[in-house]
Image: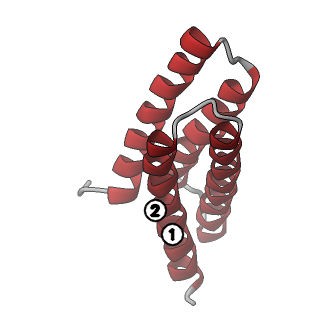
């Protein structure tokens, strides 16, 4: 199997979110939002991986679409963490930009798969 940029970027993003979640819990004693962010952000890559062995084109598109929904939810949690001053703006910007890139790649993948 060749290099899969979407797979690699989503995995890298998940690792960054894991580290952020650990810091939020240990340094800020923030458990609820960090858990929600952790769940949605790590689901992005997990669903991308699931789509690799989809049973059909429709299943592939569905899994990519759910991954896109998780990415959008992740953007929400990141914005909430920034606006509540739980993460600094520079860290937010880096993670937000990374997630927006995943969103764009997922949208492109879904459109290509649908033939649009």
Give percent across and percent down for residue 89.
51, 44
Question: What quarter of the picture does the N terminus occupy?
Answer: bottom left
| Badge 1 element | helix
| Left or right of 44 on screen, residue 105 | left
Figure check: 44 above or below 4: above
- Residue that appears at 50% across and 72% down: 109
- Residue that appears at 44% across and 53% down: 98
Give percent across and percent down for residue 38.
61, 31
- Residue that appears at 56% across and 80% down: 111
| Badge 2 element | helix
Label of residue 104 in the image = 1
Give percent across and percent down for residue 25.
61, 14
Figure check: 59 above or below 116: above
The reply to whether residue 52 is in sight is no
- Residue that appears at 70% across and 49% down: 76
The reply to whether residue 76 is in sight is yes
Question: What quarter of the picture does the C terminus occupy?
Answer: bottom right
User: Dot 2 corresponds to which residue?
Assistant: 101
Which image quadrant is residue 39 in? top right
* Separation of marks 2 and 1 at Cα, in angstroms: 5 Å
* Way the structure is coloured: secondary structure
Give percent across and percent down for residue 12.
37, 40
**Nearer to us in this view, 71 or 62:** 71
The answer to whether marks 2 and 1 mark residues whose Cβ atoms lie closer than 8 Å is: yes
Label 2 packing within 10 angstroms: few (<14), some (14-19), many (20+): some
Q: Residue furthest bottom?
A: 116
């Amino acid at each position: 199997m060749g290099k899969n940029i979407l797979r690699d970027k989503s995995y890298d993003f998940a690792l960054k979110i894991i580290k952020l979640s650990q810091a939020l819990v240990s340094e800020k004693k923030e458990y609820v939002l960090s858990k929600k962010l952790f769940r949605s952000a790590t689901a992005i890559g997990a669903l991308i991986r699931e789509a690799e062995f989809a049973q059909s084109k429709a299943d592939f598109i569905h899994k990519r679409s759910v991954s896109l929904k998780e990415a959008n939810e992740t953007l929400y949690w990141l914005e909430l963490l920034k606006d509540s001053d739980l993460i600094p703006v520079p860290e937010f910007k880096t993670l937000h930009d990374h997630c927006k890139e995943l969103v764009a790649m997922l949208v492109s993948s879904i459109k290509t798969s649908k033939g649009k």
